[in-house]
Amino acid sequence: MADTAKPKGGGTARNTGGRRRSRKGDTPDLSDEQPAVLLDYYRQMLLIRRFEERTGQAYTQARIGGYCHLNLGEEATVVGLMTALQERDYLFTNYRDHGYAIGKGMSPRTVMAELYGRSDGVSKGWGGSMHMYDTETRMLGGYGIVGGQLPLATGAALAVSYRGGDEVVMCQMGDGTTNIGAWHESLNIAALWNLPIVFVVINNFTGMGTTVDRSSAEPDLYKRGSAFRIEGVRVDGRDVLAVRDAATDLVERARSEQRPFLLEATSYRMKGHSVVDPAKYRTAEQAEEAKANDPVAAFEARLEEAGILTEETKSEIAGSVRDEVADAADFAENSPHPEVSTLFDYTYATPVANESRRMPADPVFAE
């Protein structure tokens, strides 16, 4: 372990990989893996890549409105984290949530329809890019407010603990979230009440346009649970197997030990903060660094070198993914828009007395 801190109370903070490339030997050996599983990981990563590329295209064509944040460059992290969860486990994410929605089990069709604001979308077209939500797959949101998901995820973990369940909550966020009040409050409660939750920080080195080193007094984010005696681990987010192993370990420990953990995954963001961000704050060297650390290309090359991914198989997977993304886009395009009459249907979960359902053209006071 390159960096170890021992917070009072027995917790530890462990560094299993940072911004630099991991040393040979730190990466799980492919010979220990089933080829079919590795190819499935590769397909999932490629699906997220192509889905997000199509999403970016649709946004420029004005088929998608509002804000839109892509998982480009974080595919290995997404697949590794989602592989670590059981179907019964809960997931809360921030607004960069499309890949997580697909990884948690939502259909690319309904995810794309939600992006298009159509009624066949996962949130019936009212949520859009930042608010994927599906109780069946137990992904309880994308959240547009930075850190808005932390108190809710902590509350869900409290509910699991209160009912004596064995589910685990995973709460994903960006690096900038570790500087807000809800971060400290949520980790404090989770540690005090021994809640089964894994907080996952996706450190892409740049919170919007400011680097982590310039915004965080402690830039080693996996250490920031130490104040709450929460064990933290850092993993190389470009390596799907390393992320899977680290996340699985913490998820299962949270399940068996009934206490919180913190995981930091370092992943390069290949584009700007959102689709409208040209990322001019990045130097040419930083942009090239992100391109050189493409997790999809790296995993593809690794599988080819091991003889697991042949040209024929690669072509088959690429064609299958291309067709699935095209089908999702066609499905979204042909899905109906929500009826205006349903505008207030999901304002509250249960009926509320005197709820206003006034449309913009309606008079302020009824006659």
Image: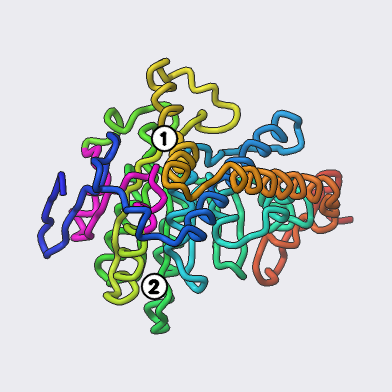
For label 2, the residue is 158
Residue 239 located within the stretch drawn in magenta: yes
Q: Residue furthest bottom?
A: 164
Amino acid at dot 2: Leu
Q: Are marks 1 and 2 in contact (CB under 8 Å)?
A: no
Q: Which residues are magenta?
A: 218-244
Amino acid at dot 1: Tyr
State the residue at coordinates (55%, 62%): 139
Number of disc labels: 2
Could you tell me residue 2's position as x and y percent? 15, 44
* Element under disc 1: loop
State the residue at coordinates (31%, 64%): 249
Task: Give left or right: position of 149 versus 142.
Answer: left
Task: Give left or right: position of 247 versus 317.
Answer: left
For label 1, the residue is 268
State the residue at coordinates (44%, 31%): 208
* Element under disc 2: helix
Looking at the picture, does residue 267 appear above or below residue 86?
A: above
Does label 1 or label 2 sit earlier along the sequence?
2
Q: Residues within 10 Å of mark 1 (few under 14, many from 20)?
A: many
Viewer-nearest residue: 137 or 180: 137
Could you tell me residue 250's position as x and y percent? 31, 63
| Image quadrant containing the C terminus | bottom right
Could you tell me residue 185's position as x and y percent? 32, 56
Q: CA distance from mark 1 to mark 2?
A: 33 Å
Q: Residue furthest top?
A: 284
Residue 61 located within the stretch drawn in magenta: no
Q: Residues within 10 Å of mark 2 (few under 14, many from 20)?
A: many
Could you tell me residue 80's position as x and y percent? 43, 54
Viewer-nearest residue: 117 or 203: 203
State the residue at coordinates (21%, 39%): 218
Q: Point out the frontmost of discs 1 and 2.
A: 1
